[in-house]
Amino acid sequence: MMKIKWLGQAGLLFEIGEKKIAVDPYLSDECERLNPLSKRRMPIDPEYLSLDPDVVVLTHAHTDHTDLPTLERWLAGGGKLVLASESAWEKVRGLGKNNCVILSPGTEWTEGDVVFRAVKAYHSDDKAVGVLISAVGKTFYITGDTLYNENIFASLPEKIYAVFLPINGRGNNMNPTDAARFAKRTGAKWAVPLHFGMFDSMTGEEFVCENRVIPKIYEEIRFEYENGEEIR
C-alpha cells in the first residue's frame, strides 16, 4: 500500500508499506527569517515536526528544499538514510550519524523494494537534481526545481505514473504553461503541480493540464479508481 501527501511548497511524504520517505520538506519559517518577503502563507502542522522518516530526499540546497530547522529535528538522532544533491549533502552531512549519499544525475540507490534514481534538473543551484522513485510497480518523478530543458527527457523512463513539478515561474522554475508542456513531454499518466501557494497567491488552477491532480496541503494525493478500488 502506498500513500502520498503534500507537505506544502515542494515537500512530499511517501508512505510505502512501513517505510516513510520525505522529499524536500519545508516545515519552518526559515525563509522568512532570511528574507521577510518570504512569509509562509500555509500554516505549519506540528504533527509533522515529530515525523520520523526512514529516508529523506533533498533535490537541492535552497532553504525551502533543504530546511535545516526541520532536518535538525529529524536527523539529530542519527540512523537515517539521506539521499541528497551534492549541494544539499554539504549542508546536512554533519546533522547526526546518518548515511548521507550524494545524488548526481544517473546515481541509483536501492532501499528494500524502493529504487531511487537521480536525473538532471536545470535550476540556479547547478547541482540540483530530479528524483525517480520506483515502488509497487510504478515510477514517480519528482522534478525538483527546474526549468523546461530538452536535455532532461532522454534520461527518463518510458512509463511514469505521476510527475510532480513546480509551476510558480519564479526563481528559475517553470511557469504553468511550460510545466504543462513538460508534463506532457514526460508522458506521465498524472501531473501534480507543486511549489505554489506558500509565498504567493497561486492556487494550482493556473496549471492547465488535462491529467492534473491539484494537491491539498497535508492531505493524501488521490489519483484514480479502477474497478471501484482506489489506486494510490
Image (spheres, helix red, strand yellow):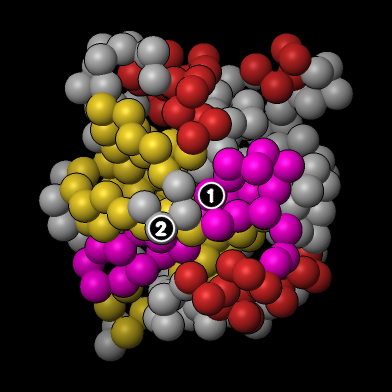
If the image is split into quadrants, where does the N terminus sit?
A: bottom left
Which is in the foreground here, disc 1 or disc 2?
A: 2
Q: Residues within 10 Å of mark 1 (few under 14, many from 20)?
A: many
Label located before the other in sequence (1 or 2)? 2
Percent of width and height locating residue 4: 39, 53
Quarter of the image holding residue 191? bottom right
Q: Residue at x 78, y 48 (%)?
A: 172
Which residue occupies the extreme bottom position in the image?
Answer: 227
User: How many discs appear?
Assistant: 2
Q: Helix or strand or loop: what does disc 2 sit on?
A: loop
Q: Which residue is mark 2?
A: 106
Q: Which residue is mark 1?
A: 129
Instruction: Report if residue 143 lies within the magenta region.
Output: yes
What amino acid type should be assigned to the residue bearing mark 1?
A: Val
Vertically, is 35 above or below 221?
above
Q: Residue at x 55, y 24 (%)?
A: 67
What amino acid type should be assigned to the residue bearing mark 2?
A: Gly
For residue 113, side relative to residue 159 (left or right): left
Span highlighted in magenta in the image: 120-149
Instruction: Report if residue 205 lies within the magenta region.
Output: no
If the image is split into quadrants, where does the C terminus sit?
A: bottom left
User: Residues under labels 1 and 2: Cα distance?
Assistant: 10 Å
Q: Residue at x 55, y 57 (%)?
A: 120
